[in-house]
Amino acid sequence: MEEFLRIMEKNARLPLEEIAAMLDQTPEETAALMDEAEEKGYIHGYETLVDWDQAGVNRVEAMIELHVSPRKSCGFDDIAQNIAAFNEVDNVYLMSGSYDLMVTIKGHNFQEIALFVAQRLSPLDDVISTATSFVLKTYKRAGRTYFGEEIDDREWNE
C-alpha cells in the first residue's frame, strides 16, 4: 500500500495500467487498492498544483501563525476544526515550537487576507495572537519546482 500511495502522491493522473505496471500488479488489483485507500481515508482527494502566476491570475497566499488558548472543554482539535470550517482556509496544522497553529489561506489581494485575519480569525475567543506572512514567490510546492523543467522521476541519471 505504501508504494501505491507514494506513486499516487507524486502523480494521481497516471493511467491505471501504468501504476499497475509500476507495482507489478494487474489493473484490477490496482483499482481495488485505490478503492481500499479511499475507503480507509488514506486518500482525501485529488488536486492539481496550479502555477497561478504563470496562468496570469492574481492570487495571494498567506501563512498565519496563531497562538491560541485551549480551554478544558475546547482543546487544540476543536479550535483547529473551527478555523478549518472557514472557506478561506486551505490548511491548518498543529505545530510544535513558538506558536500553536499554522493556517494557510489564499485570496485575490493582500487586503482581502488582512480583512479575513482582522475580522474573522483574530476575534475568535481562543485566538490570543496572530502573525501573518505573505508568500511573495513560490519556488517549490508539494515536491514540484515552479521554475525550469521538471525531471521525470522515472528516469535515472548518474
Image: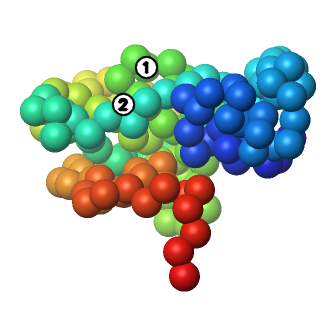
Q: Where is residue 121? Give x, y as percent.
A: 36, 30
Neighbourhood count class around disc 1 (C-alpha, 10 Å): few under 14, some 14–19, many 20 upward: few
User: Nearest the camera: 8 or 104?
Assistant: 8
> Does 115 sit above or below residue 61?
above
| Residue 136 marker | none
CB of mark 2 within 8 Å of CB of mark 1?
Answer: yes
Determine whether the residue tagged by mark 1 lies in a helix, strand or loop: loop
Q: Residue 123 vs residue 85: left or right?
A: left
Of the two numbered discs 2 and 1 in the rendering, the one whose residue sits closer to the viewer: 1
User: Can the viewer see residue 9 in this picture?
Assistant: yes
Does 94 sit left or right of 102 as displayed? right
Local packing at callout 2 (Cα closer than 10 Å; few below 14, some 14-19, many 20+) is some
Q: Which amino acid does label 1 sit on?
A: Phe
Picture residue at 26% right of the left edge, 60% below the top: 148
- In the rendered structure, which amino acid carries the disc numbered 2? Leu
Q: Name the residue at 50% across, 65% down.
A: 98
Q: What quarter of the picture does the C terminus occupy? A: bottom right
Residue for point 75% across, 45% down: 22
Q: Say if 146 sits above or below 88 in the image.
A: below
Of residues 86 and 35, the one drawn nearer to the viewer in this rendering: 35
The figure's colour scheme reads rainbow
Q: In the rendering, at what x and y percent does residue 157 appear?
A: 53, 74
Viewport quadrant of the N terminus:
top right
Q: Where is residue 14 in the image (x, y as percent from the top left)?
A: 59, 32
Q: Is mark 2 on a helix, strand or loop?
A: helix
Q: How many labels does the image show?
A: 2
Residue 128 makes an appearance in the image: no
Q: In this view, does 113 lie above or below 136?
A: above
107 or 25: nearer the viewer: 25
Measure how far apart labels 2 and 1 are at the Cα level.
9 Å
Residue hosting label 1: 86
Instruction: Identify the mark at residue 121; answer none if there is no mark.
Output: 2
